Image (spheres, rainbow, N blue to C red):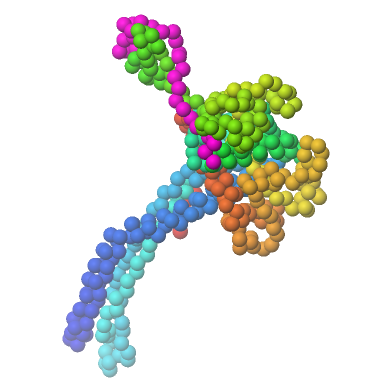
């Protein structure tokens, strides 16, 4: 027994030192575990959410091509919980054989045993986009202020016009193609040329569309002494203000508003590009400025009228833009033959490929196989086929990114309370 006690004391320093070192390492790891875990997972969460959004939009466009109901399931929040656990113990290592006459086995040393475990348990909340208010906004054409907002972005004017404008001074932009598939694609050639001319005019600095601030009178002129400080405060609360009248002796209540204007640069009125654009839009030639309004007028080709000094636009809803882009989805011949999708014809009844409508803007290819093509940027498998956007198709990738951004905007600028069901997915062990 004396020998046993001596051996234990003599060998005990090894596990003590190991445990002390382990405590130091564990403390250092524990202090940096949270930040390091965030660095390792933040990029992956970002890529996953981005990929999910792109696949969801592509899947919805495919469903619309087949006249099926689209649905959005947005990732509302991701709550990640990081956990680090550690333990340590000293285990006896028994020696063999036992000394002669010894009743108990002796252990000449203690072996340290360390355990460190980390866990990442995210809780993902998914929000179905089936609220009545969301669906109403999805189906409502964008208002004038949203058209002003879109025109002030850095996106090409031709892209904004082709996506969000249904008619421009009566010239139609494939009106039948911005709704459920009917197999007929109406006139769109003139509008495509208008969109092309708008882009050429903007790139060549011949003409451009921009928003300018104007004041609209909201009441009759008032004597200066009748406008009190309280009245000015009340006007400011309602987005209005009092300004000095033209006579300099009165005050006028006005409302600020942003007006969209097509402005022709000096000397460009007679350029071939502007002249063709003015002719197609049935505008008064030679003017420097044309106000852009949201209003509907008949097609000047079918219903001739006097040239106008204003440019009237009929806007689309997000749903109409989705239906429009769905024409760019390639459909397998097998699905045409079995009646899943109607063949498309133009206004004269001649066969037409719907992808001609979105050429240079958005195109989705289709192929069959066990795996998607290696050149695919984003893919969705549907009815046994792979639908994908080519990684080298910069126009389609740009349009996809634009629609993901704009579809998330609250175009009516209203506060809404989500009352629908939430789907929360805790990802456990």
Is residue 422 shown left or right of residue 100? Answer: right
Where, by quadrant of the figure, is residue 235 drawn?
A: top left
The number of numbered discs placed on residues in the rendered structure image is 0
Quarter of the C terminus within the rendering = bottom left
Q: Residue 29's x, y, as percent? A: 30, 64
Q: Residue at x 37, y 56 (%)?
A: 38
Looking at the rendered image, the quarter that the N terminus falls into is bottom left
Tell me where residue 322 sits by quadrant: top right
Query: How far across and how far down the image is residue 261, in percent?
Result: 52, 28
Q: Residue 354, position in %: x, y? A: 72, 44
Q: Residue furthest bottom?
A: 100
Q: Is residue 229 magenta?
A: yes
Judge by depth and name the residue closer to the eye, 271 or 251: 271
In the picture shown, does residue 332 fall above or below 152? below
Span shown in magenta: 204-231
Q: Is residue 174 left or right of residue 316?
A: right
Left or right, 241 with respect to 399, comes to left
Whether residue 275 appears in this view of the structure is: yes
Q: Residue at position x 54%, y 46% from top?
A: 401
Towards the viewer: 14 or 409: 409
Q: Residue at x 31, y 10 (%)?
A: 228
What residue is drawn where x is 81% and y is 50%?
337
What x and y, as percent, mark residue 237?
37, 19
Quick one: 423 or 240, which is closer to the camera? 240
- Residue 218 part of the magenta-drawn span: yes
Is 247 situated above or below 138?
A: above
Kindly tell me whether residue 411 is visible in this rendering.
Answer: no
Side of 247 where 366 appears, left or right: right
């Amino acid at each position: 027994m004396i020998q046993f006690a001596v051996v234990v004391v003599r060998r005990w320093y090894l596990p003590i030192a190991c445990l002390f070192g382990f405590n130091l390492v564990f403390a250092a790891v524990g202090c940096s575990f949270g930040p390091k875990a965030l660095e390792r997972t933040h990029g992956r969460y970002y890529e996953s959410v981005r990929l999910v959004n792109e696949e969801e939009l592509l899947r919805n466009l495919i469903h619309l091509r087949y006249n099926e109901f689209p649905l959005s399931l947005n990732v509302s929040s991701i709550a990640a919980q990081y956990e680090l656990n550690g333990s340590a113990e000293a285990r006896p290592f028994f020696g063999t054989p036992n000394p002669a006459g010894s009743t108990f086995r002796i252990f000449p040393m203690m072996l340290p045993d360390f355990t460190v475990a980390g866990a990442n348990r995210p809780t993902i909340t998914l929000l179905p986009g089936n609220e009545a208010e969301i669906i109403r906004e999805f189906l409502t054409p964008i208002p004038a202020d949203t058209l002003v907002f879109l025109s002030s972005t850095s996106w090409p004017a031709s892209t904004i016009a082709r996506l969000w404008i249904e008619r421009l001074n009566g010239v139609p932009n494939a009106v039948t193609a911005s709704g459920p598939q009917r197999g007929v694609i109406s006139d769109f050639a003139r509008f495509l040329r208008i969109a092309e001319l708008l882009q050429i005019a903007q790139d060549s600095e011949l003409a451009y569309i921009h928003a300018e601030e104007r004041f609209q009178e909201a009441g009759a002129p008032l004597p200066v002494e009748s406008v009190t400080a309280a009245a000015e405060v009340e006007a400011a609360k309602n987005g209005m203000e009092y300004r000095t009248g033209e006579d300099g002796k009165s005050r006028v209540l006005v409302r600020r508003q942003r007006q969209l204007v097509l402005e022709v640069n000096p000397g460009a009125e007679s350029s071939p590009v502007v002249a063709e654009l003015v002719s197609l839009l049935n505008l008064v030639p030679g003017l420097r400025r044309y106000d852009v309004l949201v209003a509907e007028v008949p097609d000047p080709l079918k219903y001739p009228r006097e040239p106008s000094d204003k440019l009237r636009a009929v806007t689309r809803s997000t749903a109409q833009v989705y239906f429009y882009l769905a024409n760019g989805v390639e459909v397998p011949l097998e699905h045409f033959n079995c009646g899943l999708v109607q063949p498309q014809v133009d206004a004269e009844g001649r066969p037409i490929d719907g992808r001609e409508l979105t050429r240079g803007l958005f195109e989705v290819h289709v192929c069959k196989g066990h795996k998607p093509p290696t050149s695919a940027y984003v893919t969705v498998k549907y009815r046994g086929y792979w639908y994908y956007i080519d990684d080298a198709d910069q126009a389609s990738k740009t349009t996809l990114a634009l629609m993901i951004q704009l579809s998330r905007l609250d175009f009516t600028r209203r506060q809404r309370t989500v009352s629908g069901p939430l789907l929360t997915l805790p990802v456990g062990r």
